[in-house]
Each structure stands twice: as structure tokens, then as C-alpha cells.
Amino acid sequence: MNKNGSTYQSYVEILKRELVPAMGCTEPIAIAYCAAKAREALGTVPDRLVVTASGNIIKNVKSVVVPNTDGRRGIEAAAAIGVVAGNAHAALEVIAHVTAADKARLAGYLDTATITVEAAVSEHVLDIIVSASKGDDTAEVQIVNEHTNIVKITRNGKTLFQKEIAATVDTGKPDYECMTIEDIYDFAMTCDLEDVRAILDRQIAYNTAIADEGLKNDYGANIGKTLLKAFGNDIHIRARARAAAGSDARMNGCELPVIINSGSGNQGMTVSLPVIEYAKEVGATQEQLYRALLLANLVTLHEKEGIGRLSAYCGAVSAGAGAGAGIAWLCGGDYQAVIHTIVNALAITSGIVCDGAKASCAAKISAAVDAGIMGFEMYRNGQQFYGGDGLVLKGVENTIRNISRLGRIGMKETDKEIIDMMIGK
């Protein structure tokens, strides 16, 4: 691929924009960030907060532990820690540097402040409004569509910042629509690695560290450790266990950051950790690992672009297929191996639903990685799913479009039912 061409530059910018650090599950962190910005706009610590959130935000914050809150869960804890100790300029690392003194103040703040949670009536699946008040002063911040995409800030009714929600993406956003599996493969094979080395080194270091932590200590249902104990140390199991262990830790309050993909730390770990493990197994060079990670990350981003950040469709499915693509290439596969792996993997696990961020995400990740590996093993054993097999169509892009339609449109009503069941309606 021509390094000076617009497609090449778009891919580099997409990777820079998407593979960023986040400490904690991104939905509660988005609430903490919104609350920190509201406190900043107010100019003081508020004693009243109203958090208005769309159903998918409520779903993904309900059960997950918020880091640096001494094991607390839920929207109230996320908003409170953002107010008490959030760095309003740190985006998804807003609560990465909370001190022991901050944690002590959090308990008192939760006891004395009035925090109200309301369901948003919104057409956006990701919509957060935090209204902060003290005395006669009020401030309000709104985030829409992406976890740090602020569209409005007001203080005492005066607009301090605003942009059209219809144009919620950042000015200068790279061209995601240029992505195709064929171009992704070309880019991954020919990319000047100096353009992406720092991004990938950070992904390897951060995500490896949290996987190590998940396997070493007690988090959630300990899916990573259970896999190794029950099924042994084979590479297929280790790849699943590493990704699951990272999620074990992250969903249950671990204070280590991860590098996300498509706005999700679980997806960032799912797409990278199995590829890193396979690279060790096959004795890959550092360059080969980088190229496999480029392939895996961009395949996942391409799959998720048509679905959206949040939906009833479990994002680990896309990331597992992306990991499968990277593994297929590391194991000697060519472009044909990659595209058949993606289609096979998507055919296997396309029915997994997202019922919020929580301990069981680690098990879903294990299943998604298993599907990615199975997709490749099918191909190299001369087996595949064909067009007409369920949602599979002839051609990888056509199959991805079908899966995107399922996640974005077909599962809308499913999403509503999941949210209603989770909040007890």
C-alpha cells in the first residue's frame, strides 16, 4: 500500500485514535469523565448530581466494579469518583490516579451528596448527561455516541461549549468507510512499522500486564485460571485463558489500564492477547507479531464500525474473529486463510448477546476466541461455511454487512428487552 496515499494515512490515524488506554470499563469511566467535566464547569464540588443515561450505558454500568472505589459498583459510584477525584482532562484515564485520601473522601461524599439516576429518552445508544448543582449554581455536560465525545457544556443556563449531535464525531476523524478486509490485509503486510510501533508496543505491554494480574490473583469468576486448571496448557487454551484473565481483572475492579479497541477494553484484550500468545508459540519475530496485531485490530474495527459502539450484540464476537485472523496469518495462512477464518468465526458465535459488563464477560471472551481459533482450524483442515448457511453470504464483506445489520438493526428490540430485564421492568 502506498504510504503517501489517503487510505494508508487513514489506517494509521484510525489506529492512533482507537488503540488508546482506559482504566476501568469504558461505560462507568465515561460517566466519571462526564461528572468530572461537570464539576469543572461548575467550579466547585457539587452536592447534587443527576445522571441521565441511555439504556446501554445503564446496562454496562450496573454490575461492573468501578476501579479506585474500594469495590463499589454502579452509576452512583462512577459519577461520585469522577466528582471527588477525577482529572477532567484525562479522558478515559479520568480516575487512573486516585489516591488513598481520595477514596476516603468518596465514602463521605456518597453519604452526603444527593445522586439521582434517570433513564434518558434518547435515539442515541450512548448518551450521558450529568447535571451538577450547588446552591443556586448548576452545570451540565452531555456525551453522545463515543465515550469521550462531549457535545454540550453549560453553566447556569449559559452555553460554554456546543456542537451539533448530528456531527458528534471529532473534526478530522479519519475515513472509517475506506476499510475493507482486502485493504486491511495489504496495509498490515506493507505498513512501515515505525508509523505504528509505539501504538502496538503499548498494547502489548498494557494488555499483557493485566492478563498476568488476572491469572495471579482472585478476580470475579476466575475464568482464565479455570480454563488452565480444567483443560491444561495447550496453546488453544492459553490463548483463551490470557484474554479471559484480563477481563476477569478488569470487570472486577483491577486498577491497571488496558488498550481498548472500538471503545472497549474487553474487545482490546480479546483481539490482542491471543495473538500475542500464538506469536510466542510459533516463534514469531517482533515484526510478525506487529503485523498480526495490525491485521487483528483493523479487522475488529472494520467489523464493529457497522454495528456501533454499544448494542445487544456482544462485541467480543467481532474481536474474537479479529484475533482469529491474526492467528491464521501467524500460523502461515495467506489472505484466503484470513477471510475464511473471519467468516467461519462469525458464523459460529453470532448469537451471543450483550447483557452488560460484568464477570461473565470473561467467559464470553473465551468462547469468542475459541470461535476465532476454530474458524482457522476449519480452513486449514479443508472445511468452511458457505453462502446461505444462516447469515453467511458469499464474500467476506457481504457476511460482515449481514452481521452488522443483525447487531445494529435486528437486535434493537432484543436490546430493549435485555435492558428492561436488567432493571427489573
Image (cartoon, grey):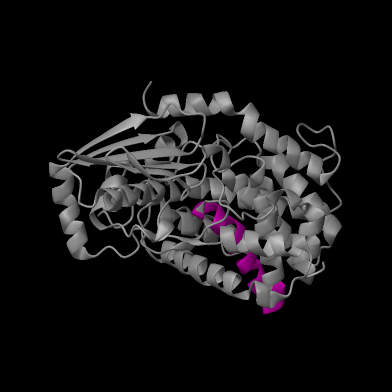
Could you say which is closer to the camera, residue 396 or residue 76?
76
Could you say which is closer to the camera, residue 244 or residue 185?
185
Residue 137: % across, % down: 20, 41
Q: Report the residue at 20% width, 60% height from top.
A: 102
Q: Is residue 209 magenta?
A: no
Find residue 192 and report its image quarter: bottom right
Q: Is residue 279 magenta?
A: yes
Residue 315: % across, % down: 58, 45
Residue 10 appears left or right of 396:
left
Q: Report the residue at 79% width, 71% height from top.
A: 190
Residue 136 appears left or right of 125:
left
Q: Quarter of the image containing the N terminus?
A: bottom right
Residue 37: % across, % down: 34, 51
Residue 282 in view: no
Find residue 74 and report its image quarter: top left
Residue sticking out furthest to the top: 425
Magenta part mainly helix, strand or loop? helix
Which residues fall within the magenta stretch? Answer: 265-288
Could you say which is closer to the camera, residue 287 or residue 368?
287
Residue 336: % across, % down: 86, 56
Q: Report the residue at 49% width, 46% height from top.
A: 361
- The total number of labels drawn is 0
Could you say which is closer to the camera, residue 135 or residue 385?
135
Q: Quarter of the image containing the C terminus?
A: top left
Residue sticking out furthest to the front: 158
- State whether residue 307 is above or below residue 37: above
Residue 4 in view: yes
- State whether residue 3 is above or below residue 404: below
